[in-house]
């Protein structure tokens, strides 16, 4: 553990892990140099870097305070916009479109950000103020220019992170955010085909306010619907706090229209064309072409999926739709009632 | 990073404080060439460790990354 290092030695290095050392929270750093985050996910870029023998053998390990020193001396680019999502709702397409332009740094579902948001589950000594400060430091370390011409910085958070939106807003009160969502049946069908965070106990139960005993008894479709409902409800509750709701149906055009306008960024026609070319490639499987596939998904929906969507998700989805359609004319917020679990 | 090979570990820490040596070592992504280069650079600076020790350290590091990644 390097406590007294010259922090300029970390130029070109990125934090890839927050962990608990015997002396406290610590950071593992990996050398990235002038490599951009062009893969669909942070883990994929880091995994590729770790194929290099240098990165296997050489990594800095520092106390978390070194992140603070880096933040103070090298704050990086101020975040341009945050992307939250319901899962399976086009967020990877949006982040890949933005990442196709060399002036954009796009960090997608970064493990060290996730670890920072969950730090209080690892140690009860971690306060909300700690997490807010650590999040600023971590984001700043990921916001460093690598190619030289970057001037926008976007973060695509993991699905559940929207539950931490109040804390994220405290850390970054001026950064606009969007929430992407999609018809619940489409999302549930996709989730049942390839399960991610919706497996019980992958995410901390307290995040969803659900009783662990009830969760154990739930069918996968119902559990996924409960988690997704909590995610959608969190976005709905905070929508007046710097947010814009985007339905999957608005993609991809919304990227260079509503989303860009909301994030206060402008693109040239050539840049729009570059982003549009990304839509010709499937976001997570580069061999395939992106296309709206809602009707095919709906054909695959089982009765359990339809029932879980109807019971847990459609009420919140309808409120999201209503809020989205009224978001330009809305003048005041309303209290959103969270569905009982 | 702890190591079963103290000379290699001392050289590793030396490299982490030396961006020039890091640049040299990053020039190859071929593992065999990397091992040769590391042993050679270490030897020039008076560190005594062998190619099989470096290869074992790389295997250990890879295993530990995988374990951390799924933690």
Image (cartoon, rainbow, N blue to C red):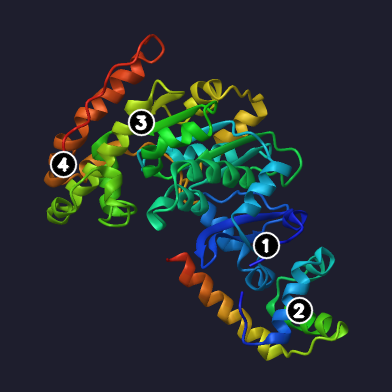
For mark 4, what is the residue?
A: A308
Return the x and y of residue A201 as percentages of the image width and height. Answer: 28, 57
Q: Secondary structure at mark 2?
A: helix
Is there one chain holding both mark 4 and mark 2?
A: no
Q: Which mark is residue A3?
A: 1
- Label 1 chain ID: A
Q: The N terminus of chain A appears in which quarter of the rendering?
A: bottom right
Q: Is residue A239 above or below residue A50?
A: above
Compute the Cα span from label 4 to label 1.
Answer: 51 Å
Residue at screen point 60% across, 29% down: A272
Q: Secondary structure at mark 1?
A: loop
Residue at screen point 18% across, 37% down: A312
Residue at screen point 72% across, 76% down: B12
Q: Secondary structure at mark 3?
A: helix
Residue at screen point 48% across, 40% down: A93
| Of the two numbered discs 3 and 4 in the rendering, the one whose residue sits closer to the viewer | 3
- Label 4 chain ID: A
């Amino acid at each position: 553990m390097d406590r007294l290092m010259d922090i300029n030695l970390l130029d070109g290095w990125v934090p890839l892990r927050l962990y608990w050392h015997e002396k406290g929270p610590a950071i593992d750093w990996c050398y990235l140099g002038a490599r951009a985050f062009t893969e669909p996910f942070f883990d994929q870029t880091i995994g590729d870097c770790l194929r290099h023998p240098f990165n296997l053998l050489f990594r800095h390990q520092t106390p978390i305070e070194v992140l603070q020193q880096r933040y103070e001396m090298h704050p990086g680019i101020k975040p341009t916009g945050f992307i939250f999502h319901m899962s399976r709702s086009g967020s990877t397409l949006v982040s890949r479109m933005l990442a196709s332009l060399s002036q954009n740094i796009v960090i997608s579902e970064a493990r060290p950000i996730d670890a920072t948001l969950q730090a209080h589950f690892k140690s009860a000594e971690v306060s909300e103020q700690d997490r807010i400060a650590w999040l600023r430091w971590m984001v700043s370390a990921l916001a460093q220019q690598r190619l030289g011409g970057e001037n926008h910085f976007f973060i695509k958070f993991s699905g559940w992170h929207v539950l931490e939106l109040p804390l994220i807003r405290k850390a970054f009160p001026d950064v606009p955010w969007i929430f992407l969502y999609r018809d619940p049946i489409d999302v549930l069908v996709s989730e049942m085909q390839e399960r991610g965070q919706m497996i019980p106990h992958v995410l901390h139960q307290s995040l969803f306010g659900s009783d662990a005993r009830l969760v154990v008894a739930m069918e996968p479709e119902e559990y996924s619907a409960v988690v997704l409902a909590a995610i959608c409800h969190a976005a709905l509750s905070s929508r007046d706090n710097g947010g814009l709701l985007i339905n999957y149906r608005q993609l991809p055009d919304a990227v260079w229209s509503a989303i860009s306008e909301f994030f206060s960024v402008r693109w040239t026609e050539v840049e729009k064309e570059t982003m549009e070319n990304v839509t010709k490639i499937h976001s997570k499987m580069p061999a395939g072409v992106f296309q709206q596939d809602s009707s095919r998904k709906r054909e695959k929906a089982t009765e359990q999926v339809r029932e879980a969507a109807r019971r847990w998700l459609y009420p919140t989805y309808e409120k999201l739709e209503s809020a989205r359609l009224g978001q330009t004319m809305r003048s005041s917020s309303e209290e959103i009632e969270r569905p009982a679990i | 990073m702890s190591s079963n090979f103290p000379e290699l570990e001392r050289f590793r820490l030396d490299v982490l404080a030396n961006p020039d040596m890091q640049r040299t070592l990053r020039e190859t992504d071929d593992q065999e060439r990397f091992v040769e280069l590391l042993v050679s650079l270490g030897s020039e600076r008076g560190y005594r460790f062998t190619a099989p020790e470096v290869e074992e350290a790389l295997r250990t590091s890879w295993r530990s990354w995988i374990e951390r990644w799924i933690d």
